[in-house]
Structure formats: C-alpha cells, structure tokens
Image (tube, rainbow, N blue to C red):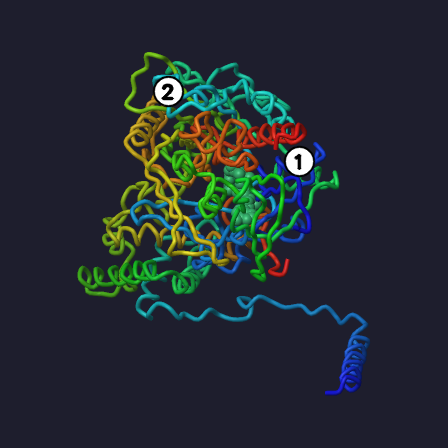
C-alpha cells in the first residue's frame, strides 16, 4: 500500500497548476503538488546591481546554454531552464525557441501580464470563412464566468470597447489619461482605415507581481490541504493495467536522482504545454487518437515597422505631442465577405515617444550620435501578435537518442510557419506602413519577417480538446478521453491559438476544469 | 577502532571544534574588498596584437567620447571584448578575427598602412561600404555582419561600463535603459 494517497496530484506550479491547487483545496480536496525546481525567495535571490558590476557587462555569459531564450539577459540568466540540463532538438533549418522556468511559480514569475480573452472568432474559428482552425468544444459563453473571476483575482485593467473580436473583461479599473497629439492622429487615421484602436489590457496583480507564487499558492497552503514537494522531476504517469486509471507518478529528486512514486486518485498535468505533452508521450498513455504532440501552435511575433513623427524630432518631443501606447485588436477576416490571402488575424501593439535603436541607422561615430539625438523621443514602434494556423504537421515527438540530466528522453520539436503566416505578416507590415504614411510619419525601417516559432513563449496545442475522441486528446473539461482521472490544464488543450496572449484563457480553463473535477469527485464519478 | 575509543575520538574532536568556535565569538572586523578592475589592468589574451590594435582603433572610430560622455577607449571596450569574444563560441570568434584581419588587409591594400595608422577619412572609405541598412536577418556577407556586430557590441560595452555610470551619477541623472541598475537573480542555492 502506498504511504499516502492524495485526492489529486498536480504536476507543475505555474499559472495553470497554481490555479488548480487553489480551486481544489478550497473544495476540501487533499492535493499534492510536485514541481521540478526549487522555491525562489524573491527577497534573497534578487539583488539590485548596475550592469557594470555584472561579470559580462550585461552581455551575459556566452556559454550560459540559453541559446533559444531571446528574453534572457545577464540579470535573469539564472532563472531559465539550462538547455544543457534539459535539452531538446529541432531540425537545423527549423529553429524553435522553447523558453522554460522550473522555479516554483514557473513562468508566472516573469510574464509581462498582458491579459486578453479569446473571442468566438477563435473558439468557433471554423464557423467563419477567414477563421484559423477548427472549433473548440466550448464557446466564449462557456468560459465567460471563469474569465470574470480570473480577471478579478489578477486585477486586470483595460478599456471596455464592446467589440466582438476583443471581448471586454471584468476590469478592476479603466485606462485613464489624455492622449498625446500623436496618439490622437494615429487613432483618427486608423479608424478611417477600418482599424479599431484601444489600449493594452494588463493584470496588476499584487504590487506588480501576478504569479501563482503570490496569488494562488498561498491561499491553497492556508487551507492546510496542499503539500508541495519542490525539486521533484516527474518522469512518468503510472496507470493501473487492470482498471486503466491513472494511479500517480514516478519522480526523481533533482539533486540525488533518487526515484519515488506518489499516488493519487486523480492526476493533473500542469507542467506547461510541451512538458505535459512530453510526460504523456514518455508514459505512452492517453493517445488512442494518435494526436498527442500534434497541432502545435504559437503566435507570430515580429514585423518591425519603425517611424518618426517629424514634428517631434530635434528636441521637440514633449508629452503633449508624443507618448503613450495604442492597441489595435484584430481587424482582418472578421466579415463574411472579406477575401484575403490568409486566414486568421493579428493585432498591432504600438508605442510612441521612443528613441530608435542605433542599429536602424547605417552610421557610426559622431554621425550616428547626431541621428540618435535628432530622433530622440520622436519614434513610433509597431509589431504584431499574429495568429498561426494549427497544422497536424507541426508537432513534437520523443527523441529517443537524447536524454536530460535525469535520464528522461527529450522532445524533438518540428514547427514551421507557412504561406498563411507569411501572407499575414506581409499584410501587417504593409498596413502599418500605410498607417504611418497617412499620419505623415517618416518610415525608418520596415520588415515583414518574424521570429522563429516559440519566440512568443505562447506554445499551445499538442493535446487539443474536442468532443470526438478520435479527433482530440482531451474532452471539454480538460479530461483525457482515454483516462478519465487524468487531466491536462495548461495551454496544451488549445484548439486554436488566436492572436491574444493566452494566459487568461489558460487560467480560466484550469479554473473551470478544476471546479468540474471537484464536482465529479464529490458525486463519486471519479 | 574499538567502539569506546571511537566515541572518545569523536568527543575530543567535537570539543576542539567547540573551542575554536568559542575563540571566534567576538565578530571580526568587517573585511572590505575591491573589484579586480580597481586594482589591475586587463590582460589581452584572445586577439593577436595586430587584431587587438585594429579593434582598439576601430572602437575609437565607432564610439568616440562626446559631450562629456566617455567613449570606447575610456570605457575599455576593446579590452572587454577581448575577454567576451575569447569566451564565446567558435563562430563568433571567427567572425571577429576575420573581420579585424579584413579591415587591416584592406587598409594595407588601399593605403599601404595598417588600419591603426590611417586617418578617419581613410578608414571611412573601408567602413562605409560595409555599413548596410538594417534588415531583420543579419547581413550574410561576413564582413558586413562583423561591422554590424562590432558596432553594437562596442556601443553596449561602452554604455554598460563603470566609466559611463560614473558620468551619469555625477550628472545626477537617473540611469535608464542599458547600464542602469536592475534586479539581478543570483544563482539559486544548489542545495535548496
Ligand atoms: C518573459 C515572458 C513574458 C510573458 N508574457 C506574457 C503576457 O504578457 N501575457 C500572457 O498571456 N502570457 C505571457 N507569457 C506566457 C505565460 O507566462 C505562460 O502562458 C504561462 O505562464 C504558462 O503557465 P503554465 O502553468 O501552463 O506553465 P509554466 O509556467 O511553464 O509552469 C510549468 C511548471 O511545471 C513544472 N514542470 C515542468 N516539467 C516538470 C516535470 N517533469 N516535473 C515536475 N514539474 C515540472 C515547472 O517547474 C513549472 O513550474 C510570458 C512568458 C514569459 C516567459
């Protein structure tokens, strides 16, 4: 007999795992959380330092094994998963940026807190001629009450607009402030072009921190129902051969590599999209559909178009003239008759009042400095968050010839963007150029290129949900079709990715799945 | 060792340790230290003497001192890059080495002098064709790529230098952007 049998075992402690722990312990269930890394101490583990005191002057250690983590710098280099310790592979011509954190709290410690809902243009994409992908088994109406509670918990602020492609949230506060002349001009021109203009929506959290470490895990611990084991690297989900039910997991101690088994009535995977998938593939379970690992999605980040407001150049930039951001939510492929050479859409997040990067001027020395002085504070920067088509071919599989530091087989990731993404990016860059020109701005650089897949850190899919067990891995409650007491509550369940940063949706799905699970367990159905 | 003698030995060792720690009881005076840069000069170890001289001249052209702000020379950018590139993966080392060699070769071809001895106008004749407008992907020509990289690296090494931060502090301006103070994550205690 196992020493303890928990009601629920959760693998992972980020947004998705933290939310599940919060909900389930509040419902009175005994929960065990296993997390691969240590517990950070935000007071002791961080010290304020000027860049010149860092050993590499802010360049970072060139051998830090963070080759794919574009977001890494010398200040935060010690927080990301070391790619030598937990490697992964991809084809040389198809790079993939997989950005991971194994501290307790996962990536919730570092996210930028941009907070959006998906709309039915994404949940029911197949119902629209320009939709990017299949339908989810749920709609916005199903998720709306959960979004509302998550937004309240995370204290999301935003401006209500009433636009169907940009569903309003349960905002703690609106976005105040008067527009600069530049913002006003851009808004007027964009509206003329049929582009709506709003403001960024973001989670305030508590003191600027909106992580599981401060918003969900403390409450769960306070119930006395949550046990957390840090440094527990889960290797495999175990299943009873007779009943076909999940029984727990095998894990290795991060330091000693000692292996142990933890038992529970229900297993929840919340290890982050691709880690949960890796765990399922390594366990060889829950895959009667053959779809685990497929339909990997993320979001397009890039399409740099930078311009300058001539009136603000040469020291004339001031807050009344230029400054502040604009957020232009999706405006393509919303109409039934719209004909484009791509499906899906993108948003345009924009900033005004910045100084351009020196790399944009083919100059050096005093001439370069003259340019930088002239353009200081006068620039408008734009990029996109764009939709990626969910494709069967974009997938992950186990790389049997490579193992991580704990002897666990690693992932091979195969993801490529195609013609749809290229056409979408071209449209976005051309649209930004048209907008800037109509505003009377000077274009400094224009590119329709985007970063490699994964760069957005919004990897989604690979265990898509659906009503048909032959065409999906999970049901609409994030439960495995094959193993009812096994759930996956992170971004793996996504059917379409949308252009919206996904965390609010991950949190709402995890909350919904966990409440349903508690109800079913209460009824004795699991 | 017999059990009794073993216990005795352990007890004696423990008592000795206790004595030592008891002797340490009054807190020693706070030991202060300084950074190695405050006491010593960096040694150039990676580039050849000729390559390093070219890098130093180049860095002065790319990022001269201006308006009371230190330039690459004052900030020791070339010395720092010798260390950084020396610690970098091979492809980056090769890019730098061949990029510097190319500048010197061009200088000798065009002006019959090493790069370190030509005028700024002459250097411009070599550098200008290598400066290309920004594109999302770096230039495929290695010499153009080198110039794009070294231009950015010299700038960052200068901006992030102690010399620059001292100027900013003297000017009583709050440092923003590159070089300014930020929370640094220490390595997480490996035993935690
Ligand atoms: C710099 C940055 C900026 C971002 N900005 C935004 C934004 O503005 N808006 C937005 O919506 N999203 C943003 N994101 C993405 C967002 O952080 C993620 O969508 C979200 O945090 C994912 O949560 P998760 O719980 O699914 O996964 P994670 O946070 O990755 O948590 C997974 C946890 O599982 C654990 N784990 C993994 N493998 C194992 C194993 N084998 N055994 C045991 N434990 C394991 C890890 O230790 C980790 O704690 C950003 C991310 C980053 C890094």
Q: Point out the residue furthest to the front here.
A: A242
Q: Is residue A374 visible?
A: yes
Q: Position of residue A452 (x, y in %)?
A: 36, 41
Q: Is residue B37 above or below residue A163?
A: below
Residue located 47% across and 51% down the image: B159
Question: Compared with residue A263, is residue A152 higher up or lower down, i.e. above or below?
Answer: above
Picture quadrant where residue A33 is located: top right
Identify the residue under disc 1.
A22
> Closest to the observer: A87 or B73?
A87
Label 2, secondary structure: give it.
loop
Mark 1 C-beta closer than 8 Å to ligand 1: no
- Give the chain of mark 1: A
Question: Around disc 2, counting alpha carbons within 10 Å, would you say few (fewer than 14), some (14 to 19), or many (20 or more)?
Answer: many
**Horizontal and vertical percent for residue A391?**
35, 33
Comparing marks 1 and 2, which lies closer to the viewer? Answer: 1
Instruction: Using the numbered discs, state the Cα–Cα distance from disc 1 to disc 2 in whole angstroms.
Output: 38 Å
Please give the name of the residue rendered at 28% of the width and 64% of the height, measured from the top-left corner.
B117
Going by the image, does A485 lie left or right of A443? right
**Residue A505 has which mark?**
none
**Chain bearing mark 2:** A
Give me the residue at 44% from left, 71% from top: B43
């Amino acid at each position: 007999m196992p020493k303890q049998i928990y009601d629920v075992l959760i693998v992972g402690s980020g947004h998705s795992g933290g939310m599940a722990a919060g909900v389930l312990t509040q419902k009175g269930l005994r929960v065990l959380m296993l997390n691969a890394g240590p517990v950070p101490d935000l007071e002791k583990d961080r010290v304020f330092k000027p860049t010149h005191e860092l050993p590499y002057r802010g360049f970072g250690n060139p051998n830090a094994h963070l080759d794919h983590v574009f977001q890494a710098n010398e200040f935060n280099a010690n927080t990301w998963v070391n790619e030598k310790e937990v490697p992964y592979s991809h084809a040389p011509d198809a790079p993939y940026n997989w950005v991971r954190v194994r501290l307790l709290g996962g990536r919730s410690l570092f996210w930028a807190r941009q907070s959006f809902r998906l709309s039915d243009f994404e949940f029911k994409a197949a119902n629209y001629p320009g939709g990017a992908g299949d339908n989810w088994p749920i709609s916005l109406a199903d998720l709306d009450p959960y979004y509302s509670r998550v937004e309240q918990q995370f204290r999301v602020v935003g401006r209500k607009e009433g636009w169907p492609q940009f569903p309003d949230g349960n905002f703690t506060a609106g976005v105040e402030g008067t527009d600069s002349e530049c913002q006003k001009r851009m808004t007027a021109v964009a509206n003329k072009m049929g582009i709506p203009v709003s403001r960024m929506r973001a989670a305030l959290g508590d003191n600027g921190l909106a992580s599981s470490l401060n918003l969900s895990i403390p409450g769960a611990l306070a119930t006395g129902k949550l046990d957390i084991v840090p440094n527990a690297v889960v290797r495999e989900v175990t299943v009873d051969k007779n009943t076909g039910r999940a029984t727990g997991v095998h894990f290795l101690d991060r330091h000693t590599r000692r292996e142990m088994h933890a038992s529970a009535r229900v297993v929840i995977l919340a290890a982050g999209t691709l880690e949960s998938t890796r765990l399922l593939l390594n366990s060889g379970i829950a895959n009667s559909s053959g779809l685990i690992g497929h339909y990997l999605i993320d979001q397009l980040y890039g399409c740099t178009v930078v311009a300058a407001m001539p009136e603000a150049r040469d020291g004339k930039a001031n807050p009344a003239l230029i400054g502040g951001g604009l957020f232009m939510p999706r405006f393509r492929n919303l109409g039934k008759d719209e004909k484009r050479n791509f499906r899906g859409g993108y948003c345009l997040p924009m900033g005004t009042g910045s100084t351009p990067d020196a790399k944009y001027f083919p100059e050096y020395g005093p001439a370069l400095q003259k340019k930088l002085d002239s353009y200081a504070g006068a620039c408008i920067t734009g990029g996109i968050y764009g939709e990626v088509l969910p494709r069967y071919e974009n997938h992950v599989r186990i790389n049997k010839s490579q193992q991580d530091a704990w002897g666990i087989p690693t992932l091979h990731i195969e993801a490529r963007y195609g013609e749809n993404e290229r056409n979408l990016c071209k449209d976005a860059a051309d649209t930004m150029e048209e907008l800037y020109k109509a505003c009377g701005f000077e274009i400094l650089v224009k590119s329709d290129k985007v970063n490699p897949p994964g760069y957005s850190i919004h990897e989604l899919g690979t265990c898509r949900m659906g009503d048909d067990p032959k065409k999906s891995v999970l049901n609409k409650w994030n439960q495995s079709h094959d193993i009812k007491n096994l759930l996956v509550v992170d971004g793996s369940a996504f059917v379409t990715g949308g252009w919206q940063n996904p965390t609010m949706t991950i949190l709402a799905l995890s909350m919904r799945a966990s409440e349903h699970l508690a109800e079913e367990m209460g009824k004795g159905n699991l | 060792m017999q059990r009794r003698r073993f216990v005795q030995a352990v007890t004696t060792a423990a008592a000795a340790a206790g004595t030592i720690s008891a002797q340490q009881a009054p807190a020693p005076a706070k030991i202060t230290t300084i950074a190695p840069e405050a006491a010593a000069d960096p040694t150039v170890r990676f580039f050849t003497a000729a390559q390093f001289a070219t890098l130093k001249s180049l860095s002065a052209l790319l990022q001269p001192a201006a308006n009371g702000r230190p330039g690459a020379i004052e900030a020791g950018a070339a010395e720092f890059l010798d260390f950084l590139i020396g610690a970098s993966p091979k492809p980056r080392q090769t890019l730098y080495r061949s990029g510097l060699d190319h500048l010197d070769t061009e200088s000798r071809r065009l002006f019959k002098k090493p790069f370190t001895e030509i005028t700024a106008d002459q250097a411009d004749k070599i550098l200008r064709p290598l400066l290309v407008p920004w594109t999302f992907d770096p230039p495929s020509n290695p010499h153009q790529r080198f110039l794009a990289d070294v231009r950015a690296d010299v700038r960052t090494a200068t901006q992030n230098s102690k010399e620059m931060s001292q100027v900013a502090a003297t000017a009583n301006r709050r440092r923003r952007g590159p070089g300014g103070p930020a929370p640094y994550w220490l390595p997480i205690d490996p035993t935690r």
